[in-house]
Image: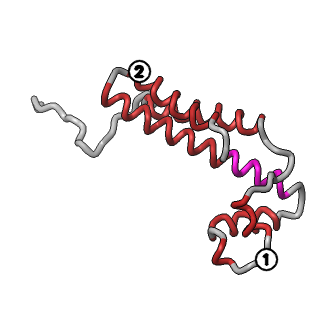
Amino acid sequence: MSDSIDFPSETETPRSRPTAEIVVALVMTVLSFVWFLSRLSPDIAFGAWQGPLLSHAPLHRVPLLSHWLAQALAAIPFGDPALRLNILTAAFGALTCGALAATGTRLGRALAGPPEAAACGIAGAAMLACTAPL
């Protein structure tokens, strides 16, 4: 029999409950998505940034990823393309709020205890979600 104890290596992570960052990020992502869906426009609200997306001008004026997503959503043969674009925008906005919540919780945990860290992440994501668009 060996008297040595096997400790997990530094690269191994123990399987345990989710961290505060993950929980706060998931909760704020879902809440932000519900918030954005409740405020969804039935059509595309025109803004100055959408001009290149709506015209057939040269592609150098529009972000390429936005152009590809708009073209992909417009190519789906059923449903309303504007609604699909709005839902995709709400999903990306909710993911951004979740990422901010995780970052705020991580930074708060380095400076304070777990409840304060969670409050920091929740406050940051809620402020981002409730900020009026420009």
Magenta stretch containing residue 88, yes or no?
yes
Seen in the picture, residue 76 relative to 4 is either above or below; the reply is below
Give the label on residue 95, or none.
Answer: none
The amino acid type found where label 2 is placed reads Glu
Closest to the observer, 126 or 98: 126
- Judge the density around disc 2: few (<14), some (14-19), many (≥20) Cα neighbours within 10 Å: some
Give the label on residue 116, or none.
Answer: 2
The amino acid type found where label 1 is placed reads His
> Dividing the picture into quarters, in which one does residue 110 lie?
top left
Describe residue 81's horizontal placement relative to residue 67 as left or right.
right
For marks 1 and 2 on the same chain, the one whose residue lies earlier in the sequence: 1
Describe residue 4's horizontal placement relative to residue 62 as left or right.
left
> Dividing the picture into quarters, in which one does residue 17 lie?
top left
Seen in the picture, residue 8 relative to 74 is either above or below; the reply is above
Closest to the observer, 76 or 16: 76
The residue tagged 1 is 56
Look at 34% across and 34% down and name the residue there.
14
- Judge the density around disc 1: few (<14), some (14-19), many (≥20) Cα neighbours within 10 Å: few
> Dividing the picture into quarters, in which one does residue 48 lie?
bottom right
Magenta stretch containing residue 51, yes or no?
no
Point out residue 54 in the picture as x, y percentages from the top left corner. Answer: 79, 67
Closest to the observer, 102 or 19: 102
Disc 1 secondary structure class: loop
Point out residue 109 in the picture as x, y percentages from the top left corner. Answer: 35, 28
> In which quadrant is the N terminus drawn?
top left
Using the numbered discs, state the Cα–Cα distance from disc 1 to disc 2 in whole angstroms: 50 Å
Look at 55% across and 34% down and name the residue there.
125
Q: How is the image coloured?
A: secondary structure
